[in-house]
Image (cartoon, rainbow, N blue to C red):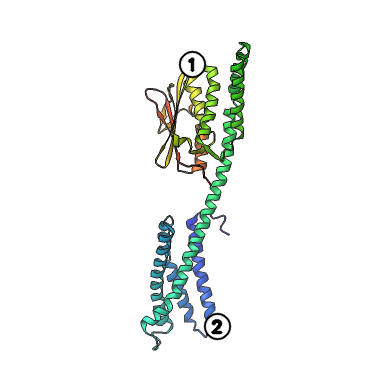
Amino acid sequence: MFKNIDDHNQQFWILHTLGWIGFAVVHYLGSLVHEMRDAYLMVVALDAYVGWLLTIPLRYIYQRTWSWHPVKMVLTVLLLATLVAVLWTIVKNYSYWEIYRHGFQPKNLSWLQQYLRQTPVSFYVILSWSGMYFGIKYYQTLQREKQKLLTATNRAHEAQLKMLRYQLNPHFLFNTLNAISTLVLTNENNTAEKMVTRLSDFLRYSLYKDPIKKVPLQQEISAARLYLEIEKVRFSERLKVHFEISEDASQALVPSLILQPLIENAIKYAVATQIDGGHIAISAKKFGHDLLLEVADNGPGVPLDDGLPKSEHSGVGLVNTRERLAALYDNNFSLVLTHNDPQGLKVNIRLPYELEATE
């Protein structure tokens, strides 16, 4: 019934109120087995209302304990449930003896005995409320993760289609095939054969890598080398490339083809537009719990505004990359553009450092 209520705060108040109303109804119906005066309805309503009030602060405290160690969280829940149960028992006894019994209290029970007898029942009710709260919150968390995974799947497939437009760009294929044809005409058959093999390997990697799955960075670097070696035939000495990949970074998991649009941008705007060509530097290193990736060039650069290109055409591939990262990592990533020194553009990506699970 709550699947259309997206506001979790609204869900809490509805379930919280319905739960205590249900408690009052069950408690009152159970009392009908015995002969009870009509005033007992007021007592039950007051008990449920006080329980409704006392458990509200627990919600905000439990929100803080959600990420705690399980043992610490359980001990905190038990302690808070005991404290609230004692307070609730005090109010219930007051309303029972002052409202329902009109001040009469059984002579055979002391004040302490009354509380010792009733507090465990209150404790079990508050503990049940706590258990339902954590159970519902855990269910909501699972639903959010399921929704995020579904969104990531859809976004990644959309991003794959967009990236294939770049990877299978007709100009790229035309230029590559033209370079191979030129090599054949000049009897450089060995070089032409190598280029065909590289093109085949690169296209195979581009087409068959699942964009949902993450791959070791070293595979991405191998694919980048294939692409750049193909482009080197086109640009010859005008294209210079430098890799600086640390050993621990090479084993880190990254989204497949995450570097490809950035390298294509560098080729398009930094190398192809300059008579003397350009230089592309690709680096990766581990920093704490993060993986830092960087693609830099010495091209003319672009005007930036808070780490984003002002001109829309210069951001080709960046939107796709950002969408994929947001779908896979939520807010736990960054993609920032900065000016290179002395000229050019840097694209910096920060991702969580992850390794492939070993059995």
Q: Which residue is mark 2?
A: 33
Few, some or many C-alpha atoms within 10 Å of disc 1 (few <14, some 14-19, many ≥20)? few
Compared to residue 15, the image places residue 351 above or below, namely above
Residue 343 in sight in this render: yes
Residue 162 lies, in percent from the top left, at 58, 33
The residue type indicated by label 1 comes to Glu
- Relative to 278, is 160 on the left or the right? right
User: Which is nearer the N-term, disc 2 or disc 1?
Assistant: 2
Compared to residue 97, the image places residue 7 above or below, namely above
Q: Nearer the viewer, residue 65 or 47?
A: 65
Q: Give the farthest residue toward the bottom.
A: 107
The local secondary structure at tag 2 comes to loop
Give the foreground label among 2 and 1. 1
Residue 105 lies, in percent from the top left, at 39, 86
Q: Give the farthest residue toward the front.
A: 359
Q: Nearer the viewer, residue 294 or 310?
A: 294
Q: Nearer the viewer, residue 251 or 276?
A: 251
Where the N terminus falls, by quadrant? Answer: bottom right
Compared to residue 289, the image places residue 179 above or below, namely above
Q: Give the farthest residue toward the top.
A: 186
Residue 137 lies, in percent from the top left, at 49, 58
Residue 351 lies, in percent from the top left, at 45, 39
The local secondary structure at tag 1 comes to helix
Q: Which residue is mark 1?
A: 237
